[in-house]
Image (cartoon, coloured by chain):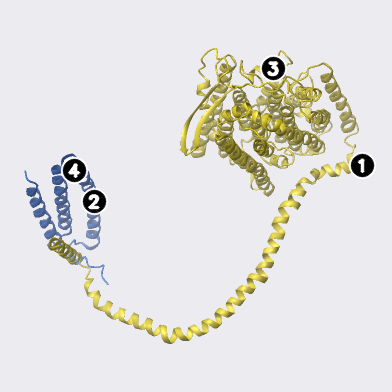
Chain colours: A yellow, B blue
């Protein structure tokens, strides 16, 4: 395992060159959106701008703080880890704590930045929504939960944030709940991710049993030292990965993410592209030593296989969608798989770098798609076309995002994607991971398909003749300015990870801390091959989708059977519905009905007849014996009550006299005794 | 001063209260008599508290509680008396005998 040298002392080994002011204040960052959530929830309609002012103010300050903290961190201020005990039960110690290190700092900047842009954009996109204030409240709560998840120093706090983002995702997917498919999509997303969360929770329990603590740094430390090891640790890591599969929409739990596009488009950009879905990646990155050292890296091999499968099947599905947001959703699943692949083959930095760049260009693409949808009032690309003439700003920024997604130099996606592919190649050559070649092949193939579906999406949206209704118009400035900001960053951020000289790798690990994993294999051939292939793919897309006026039909080609297979989403939804939901729902219901009709009804009827017979006998006894007693007792009561009622005169003073007389008797009795 | 002095005073006061409650017909005077009884109890509490020194501090605390409760009680009681007067133009307790069979 050469190259896999790890820091023995993640925190103690760090050289702190000066004291930082901001890292100590980082607990404020999740708190601010949480406060704005409460403010909007209770006073939303009375606040200026129906609540968006509070949300924007909180997230702006949070962003500035995160940026200041991160700059402080990379210029030599040390990471901050502190916690205080909430309560102790025997050996169980629950703490509140923060762990602000380089990974957290980076995530903070990404999360708060994308949240800020999405909130600005939403002032335009959502302006006539009837639940506008609630929308901002939910966005604020989401941001707060995500930041809590990232800053948590123990697994229990992380779980709180994890479930928090899940429930906000549920709220926001179902924002237009008046229509049944939207609320069904919200429920599907919630339940599907919850299946993974069960694994996550059991992973936490298992780790607590093994390591005796919830503290993430301590667990990682124990795993690095080899003090916890063995099959149980491997199982714990795999259980944690179950949670990551659900949250980051990996095969086989990826089915919820495309349906999650039922939510408003800014939500898709924030939650289902840039931030929440990377929580799974963050989890694996945060617990990386556990994954790496458990069972000689078996968990990472599993991650690699899942990633290789997911990136390919999701990319194929993106190729045949008509809904522009679903194309982006499948593309997101595929890109998330790239990040997992980076972590799995050992190029930790590249995986996180792809997370970083993807947040920018995928948020850009989603917001651009939102701008298009805003203009044409349809999600379907068959209602679009020729929009480059109507919406020049959206068109230009969208093309920048698309080129980044397709991995064309010098846009952001090029650097991060090629680093992952290079890393897989190196892991394959060095033989550090047995699944590296699988990941490499899958990643290379996916890169071509990515370019193909990206080109198809752009051609169908922006070229040709307009096929929709009405006259599309460019979106307001509140929507285009976030687009331009993200487009500018998409052009720039790639260079942060420029091979060898890029500063990005110093932003994930503190100086003095030995990096996880290893550097990818840098050479000139690989980028030339990938970019060349992508450009060739653009040509193919032009030939298939543009020049032939969309007459190219997969269904009629020799791959028709594959198309049908993909069109049903590999029958996974049918499998889940037909294989799990219906067998449980219908036969169980039928069996319950049969049992109800035959067994329970028989028992009930038999009991009824028996009861009837017994009742008749009882009735006679009742009439003659019991009633005599009852009537007699009642008559006696009536008679004695008639006598006693004279005591209740209604005169309060007489009652009081009796009371005092009673007390006097008691006093006399006690005095004698 | 011996504690018995206070007890005698308290018993005297309490007896006056009992007499007032039982014999008076005016509802306000009945309430006043109840206050007398409560204050008789307070004198007992404070007297024993003083007798016991430091150990008797709870006695003073209870006396304060009794004062607070008495204030609340007389507040409610007078409100009831006013309402009864509005309805019946009389606050004679002899006539307030609606609550019987």
Question: Which residue carries the number 1 mark?
Answer: A556
Pointer 4 and pointer 1: residues touching (CB < 8 Å)? Answer: no
Asked if both marks, 3 and 2, belong to the same chain, the answer given is: no
| Residue at x 22% of width, y 46% of height | B62
Q: Earlier in the sequence, mark 4 or mark 2?
A: 4
The residue at which mark 2 appears reads as B75
Dots 4 and 2 on the same chain: yes
Chain ID for label 4? Answer: B
Cβ–Cβ under 8 Å for marks 1 and 2: no
Estimate the spatial distance between the alpha carbons at disc 4 and disc 2, rounded to whole Å: 30 Å
Mark 4 or 1, closer to the camera: 4
Residue identified by numbered label 3:
A496
Q: Is residue A270 left or right of residue A643?
A: right
The one of A115 and A558 positioned closer to us in this rendering: A558
Question: What whole-number distance in Å separates the C-alpha atoms at marks 4 and 1?
Answer: 99 Å
- Judge from the rendering whether residue A254 lies leftward or rightward of residue A33; answer left or right: right
Write the residue at 69% across / 17% down: A496
């Amino acid at each position: 395992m050469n190259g896999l040298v790890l820091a023995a002392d993640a925190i103690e080994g760090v050289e702190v060159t000066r004291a930082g002011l901001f890292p100590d204040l980082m607990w404020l960052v999740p708190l601010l959106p949480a406060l704005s959530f409460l403010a909007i929830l209770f006073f939303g309609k009375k606040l200026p701008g129906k609540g968006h002012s509070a949300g924007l103010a909180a997230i702006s300050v949070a962003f500035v703080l995160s940026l200041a903290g991160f700059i402080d961190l990379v210029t030599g201020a040390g990471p901050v880890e502190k916690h205080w005990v909430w309560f102790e039960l025997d050996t169980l110690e629950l703490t509140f704590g923060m762990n602000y290190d380089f990974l957290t700092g980076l995530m903070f900047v990404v999360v708060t930045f994308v949240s800020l842009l999405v909130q600005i954009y939403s002032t335009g996109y959502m302006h006539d929504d009837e639940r506008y204030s609630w929308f901002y409240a939910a966005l604020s709560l989401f941001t707060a939960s995500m930041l809590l998840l990232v800053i948590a120093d123990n697994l229990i706090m992380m779980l709180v944030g994890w479930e928090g983002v899940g429930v906000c995702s549920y709220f926001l997917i179902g924002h237009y709940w008046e229509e049944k498919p939207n609320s069904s999509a919200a429920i599907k997303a919630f339940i599907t991710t919850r299946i993974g969360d069960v694994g996550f929770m059991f992973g936490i329990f298992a780790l607590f049993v093994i390591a005796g603590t919830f503290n993430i740094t301590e667990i990682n430390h124990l795993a690095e030292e080899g003090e916890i090891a063995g099959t149980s640790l491997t199982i714990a890591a795999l259980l944690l990965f179950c949670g990551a599969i659900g949250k980051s929409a990996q095969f086989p739990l990826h089915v919820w993410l495309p349906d999650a596009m039922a939510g408003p488009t800014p939500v898709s950009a924030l939650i289902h592209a840039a931030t929440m879905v990377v929580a799974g990646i963050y989890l694996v990155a945060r617990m990386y030593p556990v994954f790496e050292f458990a069972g000689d890296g078996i968990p990472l091999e599993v991650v690699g296989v899942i990633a290789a499968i997911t990136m390919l099947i999701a990319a194929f599905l993106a190729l045949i969608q008509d809904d522009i947001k679903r194309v982006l959703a499948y593309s997101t699943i595929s890109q998330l798989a790239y990040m997992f692949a980076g972590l799995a083959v050992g190029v930790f930095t590249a995986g996180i770098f792809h997370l970083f760049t993807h947040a920018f260009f995928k948020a850009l693409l989603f917001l651009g798609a939102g701008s298009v949808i805003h203009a044409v009032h349809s999600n379907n690309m068959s209602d679009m076309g020729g929009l480059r003439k109507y919406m020049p700003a959206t068109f230009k920024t969208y093309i920048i995002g698309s080129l980044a997604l397709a991995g064309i130099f010098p846009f952001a996606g090029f650097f991060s994607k090629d680093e992952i592919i290079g890393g897989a190649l190196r892991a394959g050559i060095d033989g550090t991971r047995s699944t590296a070649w699988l990941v490499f092949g899958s990643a290379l193939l996916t890169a071509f398909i990515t370019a193909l579906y990206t080109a198809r999406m752009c051609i169908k949206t922006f070229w040709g003749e307009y096929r929709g209704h009405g006259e599309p118009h460019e979106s307001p400035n509140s929507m285009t300015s976030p687009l331009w900001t993200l487009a500018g960053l998409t052009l720039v951020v790639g260079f942060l990870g420029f091979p060898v000289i890029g500063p990005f790798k110093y932003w994930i690990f503190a100086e003095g801390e030995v990096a996880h994993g290893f550097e990818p294999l840098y050479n000139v051939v690989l980028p030339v091959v990938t970019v060349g292939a992508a450009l060739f793919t653009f040509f193919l897309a032009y030939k298939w989708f543009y020049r032939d006026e969309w007459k190219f039909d997969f269904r009629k080609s020799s791959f028709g059977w594959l198309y049908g297979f993909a069109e049903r989403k590999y029958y996974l939804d049918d499998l889940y519905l037909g294989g799990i939901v219906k067998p449980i729902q219908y036969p169980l219901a039928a069996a319950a009905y049969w049992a109800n009709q035959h067994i329970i009804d028989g028992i009930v009827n038999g009991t009824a007849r028996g009861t009837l017979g017994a009742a008749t006998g009882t009735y006679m006894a009742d009439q003659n014996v019991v009633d005599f007693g009852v009537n007699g007792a009642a008559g006696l009561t009536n008679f004695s009550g008639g006598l006693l009622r004279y005591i209740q005169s209604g005169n309060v003073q007489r009652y009081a006299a009796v009371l005092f007389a009673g007390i006097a008797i008691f006093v006399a009795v006690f005095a004698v005794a | 001063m011996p504690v018995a002095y206070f007890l005698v005073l308290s018993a005297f006061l309490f007896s006056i209260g009992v007499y007032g409650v039982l014999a008076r017909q005016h509802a306000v005077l009945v309430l006043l008599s109840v206050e007398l009884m409560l204050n008789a109890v307070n004198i007992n509490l404070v007297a024993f508290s003083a007798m016991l020194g430091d150990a008797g501090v709870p006695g003073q605390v209870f006396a304060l509680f009794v004062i607070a409760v008495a204030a609340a009680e007389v507040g409610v009681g007078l409100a009831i008396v006013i309402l009864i007067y509005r309805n019946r133009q009389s606050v004679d307790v002899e006539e307030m005998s609606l609550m019987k069979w």
